[in-house]
């Protein structure tokens, strides 16, 4: 009910603006009426959006769109230390230099 009264008050304010525009410039009545009708249409759409967006007290089942908008959990990446050890191990088995200077100090 409060939504209806808010929309009525805004429509009356728009009508006052229409009357003021017609009083100031009566030769542009067509344009003023066009703007007024756009304003009333916008108020109607706004009222419908607010009315349908209210959830009340009932629990709603989430839509597939809401599920798709939910952020996906990020899988933790590999540990940097583990990556360094793996790289040292793979290099240490390739050449004697890497074995002595990379893998042996690590072990």
Image (cartoon, rainbow, N blue to C red):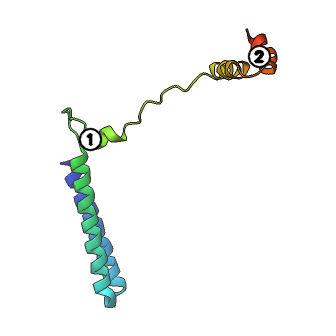
Where is residue 106, by image quadrant?
Answer: top right
Q: Secondary structure at mark 2?
A: helix
Front residue of 74/30: it is 74
Front residue of 104/9: it is 104
Q: Residue furthest bottom?
A: 27
Pointer 2 with pointer 1, Cβ within 8 A: no
Residue for point 20% across, 54% down: 4
Q: Is residue 24 visible?
A: yes
Percent coordinates x, y for residue 104 in the rendering:
77, 11
Residue for point 32% across, 91% down: 27
* Lower sequence index among marks 2 and 1: 1
Percent coordinates x, y for residue 90 in the rendering:
67, 21
Q: Residue furthest top?
A: 107
Picture disc at residue 76:
none
Residue for point 22% across, 60% down: 8
Q: Which residue is mark 1?
A: 64
Judged left or right of residue 76, residue 66 is left
Q: Residues within 10 Å of mark 2 (few under 14, many from 20)?
A: some
89 to 32, vertically: above or below: above
Front residue of 34/107: it is 107
Mark 2 or mark 1, which is nearer to you?
Answer: 2
Q: Secondary structure at mark 1?
A: helix
Picture disc at residue 99:
2
Q: Is residue 12 visible?
A: no
Percent coordinates x, y for residue 55 in the rendering:
22, 40
87 to 21, vertically: above or below: above
Judged left or right of residue 63, residue 69 is right
Percent coordinates x, y for residue 86 in the rendering:
65, 20
Distance Cα–Cα, label 2 vs label 1? 55 Å
């Amino acid at each position: 009910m409060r939504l209806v009264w808010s929309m009525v008050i805004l429509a009356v304010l728009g009508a006052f603006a229409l009357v003021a525009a017609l009083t100031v410039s009566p030769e542009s009545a067509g344009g003023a009426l066009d703007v007024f009708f756009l304003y009333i249409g916008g108020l109607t759409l706004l009222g419908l959006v607010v009315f349908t967006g209210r959830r009340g007290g009932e629990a709603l089942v989430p839509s597939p769109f809401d599920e798709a908008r939910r952020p996906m959990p990020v899988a933790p990446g590999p540990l940097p230390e583990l990556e360094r050890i793996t790289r040292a191990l793979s290099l240490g088995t390739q050449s004697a230099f890497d074995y002595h200077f990379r893998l042996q100090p690590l072990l």
